[in-house]
Image (cartoon, helix red, strand yellow):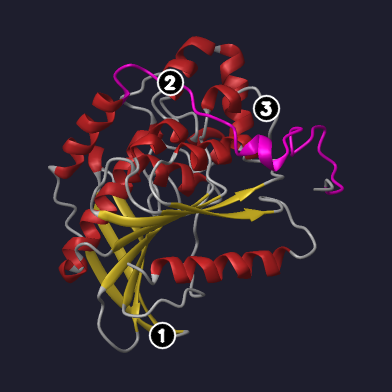
Amino acid sequence: MQPFKHNYPFDPCYGYSQDDLLAVGAPDGPEDFYAFWTKRYLRAMEMDPKPVIKPLGRVKKGWRTHDLSYQSTDGVKIGGWCLTPADGPVEKVLVILHGYGGRVAPDYHWEFEKTALLFPCARGIGRSPHRPISANPMWHVLHDIQNPDLYVHGGCVDDVWLGVSAALGLFPQAEGRIGLIGASFGGGIGTMALAWDRRIARAHFSVPSFGNQPLRLKLKTTGSGAAVQSMHKRKPAFVERTLGYFDAAIAARWVTVPVHFGCALFDPMVAPPGQFAIHNAVRSEKRLFTLRAGHFEYPGQGSDERAMLQEVHEFFSEV
């Protein structure tokens, strides 16, 4: 692929061809990686999220809009939105996660039938403010990074699991037909959640973050990744210790359901080798849509995204 013209002081392709990207592996991770996450998941499953949806009295593009709230771990209240079909029943649910830019409204472009869409905001972001967690990605990504048990990304994974519990509480008829969608931040957090939650039937992750953390620390980048790299220069030991548990490529080895990926060849914010490391580590059925770029505007972007969206709709029609 010919590189795009850009003003970054580094190569957002990082010198990798597509064949190179498809060969990127995942690190080994801590010996107690499985035990760490299993314990965390079981703790979350002990909770009743007490979900509430309140209709807002408006319909847009065939979707009826509701406010959504539920309880997550650590006393965090999660806010967001729920869309239900304007007409007809709900037979399945998709939990849709946001990127590190947050979320200010639900997405109405989805064309799923007989489906409810949940749009939770991760703790500290958007409709889920929780002091002292900052909504700024550059600070959010560092919150309690010195302690694996307290690190904010673990709480964000909890928020996804409790979001699935909330979905089943609101729509129990959808058991066995729960899907998960996440992009960038939401793709990495979503992968870590999917690895342990057998209630999720399939997932789609676009330009997923937090893959192969040792490599991610070495590749120049922008955004939240740069904040982690800066902290790593000051406190390498505790950053490396914590990130060993929060590596989406390691978690991906435990995924057992079909996953559709959208991975980019060029990305200044989420380095492509990390994205592909997550895809490559999944051992279950997987499908890949290759994007020419992520987190970057380019000619033909709209047609690429429409083509991927069509694949995603078809992929979830099989749930």
Which comes sooner in the sequence, label 3 or label 2? 2
For the residues marked 1 and 3, what is the alpha-carbon distance in whole angstroms? 45 Å
Q: Which residue is mark 2?
A: 28
Q: Residues within 10 Å of mark 2 (few under 14, many from 20)?
A: few
| 126 displayed left or right of 85 | right
Disc 2 is placed on an element classified as loop
For the residues marked 3 and 2, what is the alpha-carbon distance in whole angstroms? 19 Å
Residue at 23 percent across and 32 percent down: it is: 38
Please tell me whether residue 11 belongs to the stretch shown in magenta.
yes
Which comes sooner in the sequence, label 2 or label 1? 2
For the residues marked 2 and 1, what is the alpha-carbon distance in whole angstroms? 48 Å
* Amino acid type of the residue tagged 1 in the rendering: Val
Residue at 47 percent across and 42 percent down: it is: 188
Quadrant in the rendering for residue 318: bottom left
Q: Residues within 10 Å of mark 1 (few under 14, many from 20)?
A: some
* Amino acid type of the residue tagged 3 in the rendering: Leu
Task: Measuring from the top left, give residue 230's x and y in whole percent.
Answer: 62, 22
Task: Measuring from the top left, give residue 140's x and y in whole percent.
Answer: 48, 36
Predominant secondary structure, magenta span: loop
Please tell me whether residue 157 belongs to the stretch shown in magenta.
no
Assess whether mark 3 and mark 1 are in contact (beta carbons under 8 angstroms): no
Q: Nearer the viewer, mark 1 or mark 3?
A: 3
Residue at 41 percent across and 43 percent down: it is: 191
Disc 3 is placed on an element classified as loop
Task: Measuring from the top left, give residue 11's x and y in whole percent.
Answer: 79, 35
Q: Which residues are magenta?
A: 4-33
Q: Which residue is mark 3?
A: 219
Residue 59's mark?
Answer: 1
